[in-house]
Image: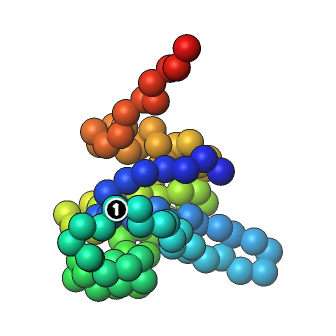
Amino acid sequence: MEKIIHPIKYRIIERKITPEKSYWHFLKGKTFYNPLNLPNEDDIEFMFGTTKKKVVIELFRINGGKVGYYLVNLLEKKYYYCGQDWASIKVKLRELGIGRDEPNYP
């Protein structure tokens, strides 16, 4: 799995369905720059005035709970389905104007 760098207001969520259960997995990242000492990953939903349950309800509404990766803008309450592979998250972030291609080194 390749690393993806994104602003704290975004949350990456994976929808999985197995024979035993189906679930939404809120992927946790590592903070590498936090000059304002914002809350850690566990408190992100609270910081933006929502809950994991509310986020999951909205994600289910946009795509019926389809398997794959989702991206949530917690600040603006925008929800996106990215696709079934990890690289699709990076593509969606680029569509939203976040990130850039890595430079080619000689």
Which residue type carries mark 1?
Tyr
Query: In the depicted view, which residue is nearer to us: 62 or 34?
Result: 34
Quick check: 90 above or below 62? above
Q: Which residue is mark 1?
A: 33
Residue at 31%, 43% in the rendered image:
98
Total numbered badges shown on the rendered structure: 1
Tell me residue 73's x, y (percent): 29, 61
Quick check: 100 above or below 23? above
Tell me residue 85's x, y (percent): 61, 47
Q: Quadrant of residue 9?
A: bottom left
**Which residue reaches farthest right?**
19
Q: Is residue 63 visible?
A: no
Residue at 46%, 62% in the rendered image:
12
Query: In the depicted view, which residue is nearer to us: 60 or 5?
Result: 5
Tell me residue 28's x, y (percent): 51, 71
Q: Quadrant of the C terminus?
A: top right
Q: Is residue 59 visible?
A: yes
| Left or right: 25 in relation to 70 | right
Q: Secondary structure at mark 1?
A: loop
Residue at 52%, 20% in the rendered image:
105
